[in-house]
Image: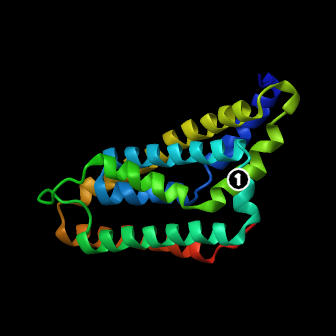
């Protein structure tokens, strides 16, 4: 059982982190530009699901393996870089959504959000650095406390990142009637994904 005082301290800290623009928010923004509001929400759900998996892994103590084994960290990181570059190429090649283009199933957006989050090993390092500050072994199961805090972060992130993606999807829908604007949005979306790949490639282990 998590003490009320601890929750009152955790929630504002978590909200401050959620509202800080980061890789997840930029990814959902790019997904909204590329595919629209509904896929952006699905991508946000995928990101939040990935966050919960990271929290579960950290709560089970497996996160220590990622932080202590450089090669494992790098393998996961480069998988993420490759996947983001693949998404960037797809966005540039196909451009933004158009009325004539076939609609990509929403489940693919969920998958993309999940994979992008899971292949960012810095997320689990963040979880290992942030959540334990609020965990008290004397008040109950450590894993249950990790999951509780993780659910709060995941729900908040889903709402905020989803709204960002919906906004981007609305802007994309307004501009879609202009073929040139649609082409430019494809390049912008690809640029966002490529920038996230570069950021992941050059980041250092904590």
Q: Is residue 180 above or below residue 46?
A: below
Residue 3 position, x and y percent, is: 81, 24
Q: Residue furthest right?
A: 138
Label 1 neighbour load within 10 Å: few <14, some 14-19, many 20+: some
Q: Residue at x 72, y 67 (%)?
A: 69
Judge left or right: residue 21 versus residue 96: right
Residue 22 position, x and y percent, is: 58, 58
Would you identify the image quadrant in which residue 97 lies?
bottom left
Give the residue at mark 1: 63
Q: Residue at x 64, y 42 (%)?
A: 56
Using the image as rendered, state which of residue 16 and residue 62 is in the foreground: 62
* Total numbered labels placed on residues in the image: 1
Q: Is residue 132 visible?
A: yes
Q: Is residue 193 visible?
A: no
The secondary structure type at the circle numbered 1 is helix
Residue 116 position, x and y percent, is: 49, 59
Using the image as rendered, state which of residue 119 and residue 42 is in the foreground: 119
Q: Is residue 194 above or below residue 147?
A: below
Judge left or right: residue 93 versus residue 71: left
Q: Residue at x 26, y 74 (%)?
A: 93
Which image quarter holds the C terminus?
A: bottom right
Which image quarter holds the N terminus?
A: top right
Q: Residue furthest left?
A: 100
Colouring chosen for the image of the structure? rainbow
Q: Is residue 15 above or below residue 71?
A: above
Q: Residue at x 68, y 35 (%)?
A: 149
Judge left or right: residue 111 versus residue 177: right
Residue 17 position, x and y percent, is: 66, 49
């Amino acid at each position: 059982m998590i003490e009320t005082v601890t929750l009152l301290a955790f929630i504002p800290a978590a909200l401050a982190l959620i509202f800080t623009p980061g890789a997840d928010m930029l990814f959902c923004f790019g997904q909204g530009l590329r595919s629209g509001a509904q896929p952006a929400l699905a991508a946000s759900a995928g990101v939040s699901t990935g966050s919960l998996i990271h929290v579960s892994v950290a709560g089970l103590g497996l996160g220590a393996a990622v932080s202590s084994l450089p090669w494992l960290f790098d393998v996961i990181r480069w998988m993420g870089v490759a996947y983001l570059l693949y998404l960037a190429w797809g966005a540039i090649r196909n451009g933004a959504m158009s009325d004539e283009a076939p609609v990509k199933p929403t489940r693919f957006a969920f998958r993309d959000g999940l994979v992008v989050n899971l292949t960012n090993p810095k997320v689990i390092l963040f979880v290992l650095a942030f959540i334990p500050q609020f965990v008290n072994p004397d008040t109950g199961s450590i894993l249950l406390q990790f999951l509780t805090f993780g659910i709060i972060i995941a729900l908040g992130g889903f709402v905020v990142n989803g709204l960002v993606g919906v906004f981007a999807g609305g802007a994309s829908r307004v501009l879609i009637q202009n073929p040139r604007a649609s082409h430019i949005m494809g390049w912008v979306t690809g640029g966002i994904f490529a920038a996230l790949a570069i950021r992941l490639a050059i980041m250092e282990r904590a």
